[in-house]
Image (tube, rainbow, N blue to C red):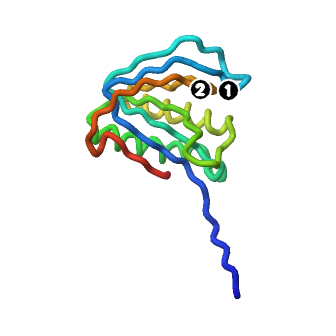
Amino acid sequence: MEVVKILIRDFMKVLVMYVDEFSYTPSQKNLDDAEEVTRGAHYKEAVLAFIQVEKGDEEYDVKSREKKLVNHLKWVSRKNQCKHVILHSFAHLSDSKASVEFTKELFDLAEQRLQNAGYQTAQTPFGYFLDLNIKAPGYSLARIWASL
């Protein structure tokens, strides 16, 4: 019997929600070298992206992965008639994880590209577990999951 191996690559997972309101407060620092954050933030009418960058993403140029992410976020934003995007690192969508350095670089590049396109942006504190409050409406394009 011949065994066939199928190469399955893990790519970035993104769960995007349109939110009427979103707020967070830092709860627990989970990266020793993360900058100190003691204050939370509150946002209204925004696209909130829970993003897990995966090990397979590091096989490609960070700018190509950033472009794919931004194109998806812009599409979701247009569908929800929204120009405010919040990037949230959420390493709980699979077991595969890219390095902290690659992930942070991708987030920073994506934020800059979105700003250059006229979007208001924010990132939740990188390297923290956060207490989250989310108020999201219940319609189909308010929640979109993708593997990019």
Along the horizontal axis of the image, is 143 left or right of 86?
Answer: left
Q: Name the residue located 48 percent from the left edge and 37 percent from the top edge.
A: 50
Q: Which mark is residue 144?
A: none
Q: Name the residue located 42 percent from the left edge and 24 percent from the top edge.
A: 133
- The percent position of residue 76, horizontal first and vertical second, equals 35, 42
Within 10 angstroms of label 1, few (less than 14), some, or many (20 or more) residues? few
Counting residues from the start of the chain, the first of labels 2 and 1 encountered is: 1
- The percent position of residue 34, horizontal first and vertical second, equals 67, 22
Question: What amino acid type should be assigned to the residue bearing mark 1?
Answer: Asn
Please say if 28 is above or below 47: above
Write down the residue under mark 2: 129
Q: Identify the image quadrant of the N terminus.
A: bottom right
Q: Name the residue located 43 percent from the left edge and 20 percent from the top edge.
A: 23
Dot 1: element: loop
User: Which quarter of the figure has residue 46?
Assistant: top left
Write down the residue under mark 1: 30
